[in-house]
Amino acid sequence: MIKNYLNTNNILIGVDIKNKNDAFNKVFECLKKQNAIEDKYLNSMIERDKNSSVAIGNFIAIAHGTVETKDLIKKDAMCILVLKNPIDWDGNEVKVVLGLALSGDKTMDVIGNIGVAFSDEEEVKNFYYKNDLTSNEVLKWLVAHDE
């Protein structure tokens, strides 16, 4: 399922941000560049995180909007930020930020698949903390864990 929405062009490696607000802005830019969302989607992602943190542990945060703002999604899209340095996100160390703009029930399906992919903390740390990680490697890793 992930390979339907993700390609190497929307996997950004070595993103230099300082906090989760920077992360939301960068995810917004990435999804906007894909012409996937309306401008108000940024506020929806921030609101969703205020209601319940989107940092789910094992170095990942999954930025997505609220159910009530699905109409702000023009087309299904994803993006991934692999951060240069981890940030603190509500007490969680985050190295990878996944941005979702998915219609219908697809968001929960992808979150479930991502949860499985990121379930082995040691594997995640060994993979995403490599110095020479490429967007192609990230795509292959996620697709392999999505099947």
Image: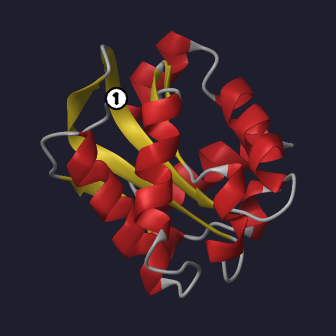
List x then y, in percent, for residue 83: 27, 44
Q: Residue at x 73, y 25 (%)?
A: 116
Instruction: Check disc 1 and give the amino acid type.
Output: Val
Q: Give residue 77's position: percent from left, percent from top.
A: 64, 70
Name the one closer to the observer, 102 or 83. Answer: 102
* Residue at 48% in and 52% down: 45
User: Does the image show residue 59?
Assistant: yes
Looking at the image, residue 14 sits to the left or right of residue 104; the answer is: left
Question: Image check: 80 left or right of 107?
Answer: left
Looking at the image, which is closer to me, 125 or 74? 74
Residue receiving disc 1: 94
Picture residue at 51% right of the left edge, 70% below the top:
8
In the displayed structure, 72 sits above or below 123; it is below
Question: Would residue 87 be found to the left or right of residue 145 on screen?
Answer: left
* Mark count: 1
State left or right for residue 117 relative to residue 50. Answer: right
Residue 36 horizontal/vertical position (percent):
59, 80
Q: Quadrant of residue 28?
A: bottom left
> Quadrant location of residue 89?
top left
If the image is split into quadrants, where does the C terminus sit?
top right
Percent coordinates x, y for residue 118 in the rendering: 60, 26
Q: Is residue 133 visible?
A: no
Front in this rendered view, residue 115 or 9: 115
Residue in the picture at 24% in, 48% down: 21
Quarter of the image with the N terminus is: bottom right
Badge 1, how many Cα within 10 Å: few under 14, some, many 20+? many
How is this picture coloured?
Answer: secondary structure
SS at mark 1 in the image: strand
Q: Which one is nearer the viewer's eye here, 10 or 40? A: 40
Question: Is 54 located above or below residue 31 in the figure?
Answer: above
